[in-house]
Amino acid sequence: MALRTKMTGLWAGIGATLAATTAFAQTEGMREGLDIIGAPQPGGIAFQPAVTGVAQDIHALDNLLLVVITAIVLFVVVLLAWTAIRHNAKANPTPATFTHNTPIEITWTIVPLLILVVVGAFSLPVLFRQQTIPVADVLIKATGYQWYWGYEYPEEGVEYLSFMLDEDQLEEYGYGRDEYLLATDTAVVVPTGQNIVVQVTAADVIHSWAMPAFGVKQDGVPGRLAELWFNVDAGMEGVYFGQCSELCGVSHAYMPITVFAVTPEEYAAWLAGEAQEFASIGTRAPQVLELASAD
């Protein structure tokens, strides 16, 4: 990809900074030990698996709203059918002449109000939980560029860029054809069972960091720093895919997001430099898992 080559050359000029970090050099390892969990499915109409508490809350709220709107639609359809049958010209040749019905008017005011109160009672706690950022066990800064992502672990001194893989690179990184337009050459690495806070910003135009399986999406606005958080359930180690979700230019569709959720032991091994090439996919998984289990 010409754009990727151009941007790689640009950042090579700052190579002294990036090359000193652990993750930027980790570009060709790890895949066999992680299953792909969060990915779109052909013809799929459901959510991706919910692997965080926030995502589970969103799914529960969506199910509740589906019940509510289904009941409303069925009621309206039945009411329309009853009205058409009961009050057509043949069945009711002499129409009524009244213009008001106070009980009905009170009912169609109070009932929708009660429905909105129920919806609000269940949706506001979900919103508050999303927007109440906990103390971070792991802090990550994600910066959107046209059209790739930059990641920084400020407390760990780790910094690297993440580009979408070309179609002919997928096999080299351990991906299949189905992961084209989803997989990147480096991934965000996070431990399961810990609070991950992601600070999102952008360097040029508005981007959006979105990870459906985590139930998070946050716009990155140049000059501003926004936050999101998630905590991947223990036992849900795997590969998760997301996308920039804010129209950001001609190559908007080509800046995906890859997250590796791993055990805390594997994450510690990665930070310690023992899990070589762990930020991206390939053949190092058995060695990485062995190192982590030995610790």
Image: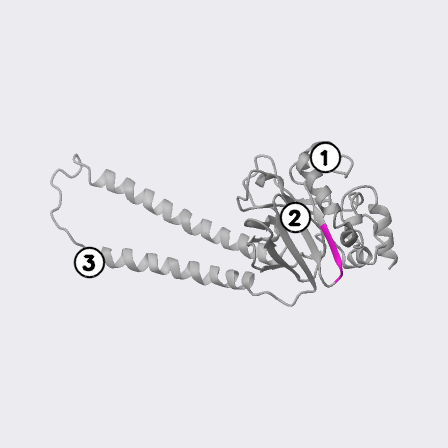
Report the magenta residues as a range. Answer: 156-160
* Residue located farthest toward the bottom when viewing the structure as drawn: 135
Left or right relative to 103: residue 121: right
Looking at the rendered structure, which numbered label has been put on residue 176? Answer: 1
The nearer-to-camera label among 2 and 1 is 2
Amino acid type, callout 2:
Trp
Mark 1 secondary-structure assignment: loop
Task: Indicate the quadrant where residue 138 lies.
Answer: bottom right
Mark 2 secondary-structure assignment: strand
Residue at 76% over, 52% down = 18
Residue neighbourhood size for the residue with mark 3, other residues' Cα within 10 Å, grouped as few (<14), some (14–19), many (≥20): few
**Residue annotated with mark 3:** 102
Q: Nearer the viewer, residue 90 or 29?
A: 29
Q: Nearer the viewer, residue 13 or 238?
A: 13
CA gap between label 1 and label 3 equals 64 Å
Looking at the rendered structure, which numbered label has been put on residue 149? Answer: 2
Q: Is residue 15 visible?
A: yes
Amino acid type, callout 1:
Gly
Residue 137 screen position, x and y as percent: 70, 64
Question: Is residue 74 placed above or below 89 in the rendered structure?
Answer: below
**Quadrant holding the N terminus:** top right
Q: Earlier in the sequence, mark 2 or mark 1?
A: 2
Q: Earlier in the sequence, mark 1 or mark 3?
A: 3
CA gap between label 2 and label 1 equals 22 Å
Residue 118 in the magenta stretch? The answer is no
Residue 159 in the magenta stretch? The answer is yes
Residue 110 screen position, x and y as percent: 30, 60
Residue at 59% over, 38% down = 251
Badges 1 and 3: C-beta atoms under 8 Å apart?
Answer: no
CA gap between label 2 and label 3 equals 59 Å
The nearer-to-camera label among 2 and 3 is 2
